[in-house]
């Protein structure tokens, strides 16, 4: 008996499973596409779009399936071969028992050279040998330890008593008849060996065809497989990176600064007076400040608690100031001086965002970094780079949203980053970009929104045409030239809202869709040619063209 086959047998077996998995994916998406074609809710989506969208996701799923299948291939094949090798060794090395006697007549039995491996899932494997009694000719299966196999009696499915089994053979057909003497129940089973064999050969033929047709498409070579695996692992790693980047931003100076209260000297004085007086420090007063990049405010006060010694008085005040100022834009600088119950010192005021950031950056706690070896390995992967950016973006977004609690209208961003205004598209550094949940706007556009020239538009340029239309879009999307625009506005068909800078010059005009229904009816948007190419993502997450849409799928 051959349990262990050559390696190709196992490769075929595994590849077949892979092919069937992949075909399942194709089948699922074919169904989705078909259902989508007849879906009433999607009746406005062009067929090409349905096809290309479904195909994109299908290729993506196929990619994942292929990578997952490849990942387990070697391991699974080794497991199968190992299991069969164990069987083979057990079978080959089993030693025939000596001196076995017939259980009926006690005569010695002769080996017949037939052996069989018994392999039940709930018992250890055993090899048994077929022996024949030299005297009464009865045959028995005998295990290596000379124990004779006791066949379990067939039981009647109706009454549970022992049932009699008879079989008759006619050519390739064996008929089994089971008859119960107790209750009279009987059943017949026809085993057509030839038919079974044909079915087996047919299945084998089908499998062979599947392998021929799809192996190169669905089963990855080592070279491609390793590349897929790298990307798969990079993707898994990318999730960690994204989380880390988000977290980093959340713990960052930026997040701390967003919580800071910015107090003027008057507010500060009021806050400190209340707190200090409770601790018996009185008559807080600030003398004239030194104003430069920072503001230094010298102060004096008196210790009303005459029993306090100078060092205790100083340290108590220091501690009090430190805890009070922790979330405020003022810090104690220099040491506090104590003379005859007078205490004096200087507070430093931070005004600019970047100075506050620096103040907190120093204290930033080092995070436990992710495995540096993995970081090296996957750093080039687009998944990882993209995830890192996304994580940072999410972190920044979360911090900004928290800051909105204090400044619900929004705020200017950090100076470092460069952004384009979502309305006029002019580029500015962050300190000239206003942020709130509606989007990012340059200072000028924000002034126009605040002045009510335009509503707080929700849509950004390039994604805006169901809410508003920009001047430049009138030409590119509606083919209306500047002279015509002027004419239409004069005639009152086109309603524009002019955005002005502080010097009065008009820098952009916004046409609200809600105000221009009549105009849009007369001047509909130019129809663009539908791109019928199908794109999918390649290994590195880039879109690649995989072909034109056939007229019928
Ligand atoms: Zn016998
Ligand atoms: Zn019965
Ligand atoms: Zn703008």
Image (cartoon, grey):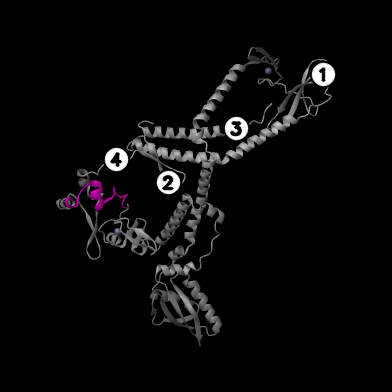
Confirm or deny contact between disc 2 and disc 1 (CB under 8 A).
no
Circle 1 packing at 10 Å, graded few (<14), some (14-19), many (20+), is few
Q: Nearer the viewer, mark 2 or mark 4?
A: 2
What is the secondary structure assignment of the residue under circle 2?
loop
For the point 58% across and 17% down, the residue is 195
Q: Residue 26 or 218: which is nearer the viewer? A: 218
Over which residues does the magenta segment extend?
460-484
Horizontal side of residue 293 vs 92, given as left or right: left
Q: Which residue is mark 1?
A: 104
Q: Which residue is mark 3?
A: 8
Marked residue nearer the N-terminal end (2 or 1):
1
Q: CA distance from mark 4 to mark 3?
A: 51 Å
Confirm or deny contact between disc 3 and disc 2 (CB under 8 A).
no
Q: Nearer the viewer, mark 1 or mark 4?
A: 4
Q: CA distance from mark 1 to mark 4?
A: 91 Å
Q: CA distance from mark 2 to mark 4?
A: 23 Å
Q: Which mark is residue 407?
A: none
Q: Which residue is mark 4?
A: 529
For the point 53% across and 85% down, the residue is 306
Q: CA distance from mark 2 to mark 1?
A: 78 Å
Q: Which residue is mark 2?
A: 542
Q: Residue 277 or 337: which is nearer the viewer? A: 337
For the point 81% across and 20% down, the residue is 110
């Amino acid at each position: 008996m051959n349990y262990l086959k050559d390696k190709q047998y196992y490769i075929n077996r595994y590849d077949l499973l892979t092919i069937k998995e992949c075909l399942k994916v194709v089948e699922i998406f074919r169904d989705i596409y078909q259902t989508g074609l007849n879906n009433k809710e999607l009746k406005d989506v062009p067929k090409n779009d349905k096809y290309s969208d479904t195909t994109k996701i299908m290729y993506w799923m196929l990619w994942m399936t292929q990578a997952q299948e490849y990942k387990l291939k070697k391991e699974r094949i080794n497991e199968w071969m190992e299991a069969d090798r164990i069987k083979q060794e057990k079978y080959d090395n089993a030693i025939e028992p000596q001196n076995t006697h017939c259980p009926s007549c006690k005569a010695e039995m002769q080996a017949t050279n037939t052996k069989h491996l018994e392999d039940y899932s709930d018992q250890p494997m055993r090899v048994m040998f077929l022996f024949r009694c030299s005297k009464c000719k009865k045959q028995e299966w005998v295990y290596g330890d000379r124990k004779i196999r006791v066949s379990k009696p067939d039981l009647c499915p109706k009454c549970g008593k022992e049932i009699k089994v008879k079989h008759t053979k006619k050519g390739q057909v064996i008929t089994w008849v089971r008859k119960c003497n107790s209750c009279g129940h009987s059943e017949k089973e026809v085993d057509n060996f030839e038919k079974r064999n044909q079915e087996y050969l047919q299945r084998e033929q089908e499998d062979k065809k599947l392998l021929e047709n799809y192996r190169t498409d669905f089963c990855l070579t080592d070279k491609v497989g390793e590349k897929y695996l790298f990307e798969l692992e990079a993707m898994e790693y990318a999730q960690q990176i994204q989380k880390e980047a988000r977290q980093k931003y959340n713990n960052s100076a930026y997040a701390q600064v967003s919580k800071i209260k910015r107090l003027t000297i008057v507010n500060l004085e009021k806050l400190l007076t209340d707190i200090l007086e409770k601790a018996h420090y009185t008559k807080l007063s600030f003398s004239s400040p030194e104003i430069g990049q920072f503001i230094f405010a010298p102060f004096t006060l008196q210790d009303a608690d005459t029993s306090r010694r100078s060092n205790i008085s100083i340290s108590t005040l220091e501690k009090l100031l430190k805890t009070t100022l922790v979330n405020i834009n003022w810090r104690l600088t220099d040491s506090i001086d104590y003379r005859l119950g007078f205490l004096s010192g200087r507070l430093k005021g931070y005004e600019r965002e970047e100075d506050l950031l620096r103040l907190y950056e120093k204290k930033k706690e080092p995070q436990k970094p992710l495995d540096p070896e993995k970081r090296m390995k996957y750093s080039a992967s687009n998944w990882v780079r993209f995830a890192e950016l996304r994580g940072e973006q999410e972190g920044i977004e979360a911090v900004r949203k928290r800051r909105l609690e204090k400044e619900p209208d929004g705020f200017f961003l950090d100076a470092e980053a460069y952004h384009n205004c979502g309305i006029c598209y002019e580029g500015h550094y962050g300190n000239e970009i206003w942020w709130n949940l509606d989007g990012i706007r340059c200072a000028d556009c924000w002034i126009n929104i605040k002045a009510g020239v335009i509503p707080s538009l929700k849509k950004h340029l390039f994604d805006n045409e169901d809410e508003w239309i920009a001047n430049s879009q009138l030409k590119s999307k509606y083919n209306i030239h500047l002279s015509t625009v002027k004419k239409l506005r004069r005639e009152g068909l086109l309603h524009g809202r002019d955005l002005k800078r502080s010097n009065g010059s008009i820098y952009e005009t916004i046409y609200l869709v809600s105000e221009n229904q009549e105009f849009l009816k007369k001047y509909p948007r130019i129809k663009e040619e539908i791109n019928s190419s199908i794109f999918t993502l390649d290994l590195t997450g880039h879109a690649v063209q995989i072909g034109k849409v056939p007229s019928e799928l």
